Image: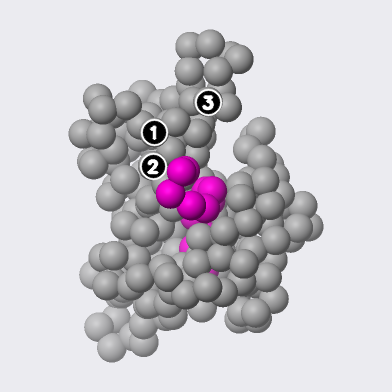
Amino acid sequence: MKLVVGLGNPGPRYRDSRHNVGFRIVEHLARAQGVEICEERFLGLYGEGYVPPSDEGAPDAPAEPLAFLEPQTFMNRSGDSVAAALAGLPDVDPAADLLVVYDDLDLPLGRIRVRPRGGAGGHNGLADVIERLETKEFPRLRFGIGRPAARDGVVDFLLDAFAPGEHRLLAERVPRAAEAALVCLRDGPKIAMDRFNADPGAPGSEPE
């Protein structure tokens, strides 16, 4: 089984905030399969579907189960939910089967970065996941949300909704990020990195 986790804050107050773009991406991936992430489980909202087979894969290969999770513990306690899910889904190996999707202040809006492992990079939600799992060895997908002009306005910027002028770009890039997540889950982070990290259509893109 694969497990994809979007990071964010629960409740309508935060639903459209920049900090909740991880939820958006995972929900887009789930909707493409007709899956609702609505079951209360593992201190979060949960749903199950399948990893769609690759066009290049064997046509008779069995579809692998895919679990979707949105922690409802608030961002800074995201690790509690992820740890509960891994305890309840023993077939999920974090290094091979887990993907965590979250926002990144240090990337331009809509930029996608996939990594097979690494530190938290200042993201409190990811830091809590690393602490609770006691490992940095799991894939992650970062989605750029840009950074405010004033350093002291970061918290408000994270918790504010996207500006009206940003919605067109989001409508293009959130599906692209969901596609990157699917490729990472199905084919592995290396293939996803090669295909999406140097995406020539991405804002601020550059070869790596």
Task: Name the residue at 23% across, 41% down.
Answer: 172
Q: In this view, does 6 lie to the left or right of 56?
A: right
Which quadrant, please, contains the C terminus? top left
Cα–Cα span, label 3 and label 1: 10 Å
- SS class, disc 1: loop
Residue 80, above or below 119: below
Dot 1 amino acid type: Ala
Residue 112, above or below 68: above
Dot 2 amino acid type: Asp
Q: Is 4 colored magenta in this rendering?
A: yes
Residue of label 3: 156
The spot of residue 77 in percent (x, y) is: 68, 52
Cα–Cα span, label 2 and label 3: 13 Å
Residue of label 2: 16
The spot of residue 93 in percent (x, y) is: 63, 71
Cα–Cα span, label 1 and label 2: 5 Å
Disc on the earlier residue, 2 or 3: 2
Residue 10 numbered mark, or none: none
Disc on the earlier residue, 3 or 1: 3
Q: In which quarter of the image is residue 78?
A: bottom right
Q: What stretch is highlighted in magenta?
A: 2-14
Residue 161 numbered mark, or none: 1
Label 1: how many Cα within 10 Å (few below 14, some 14–19, many 20+): some
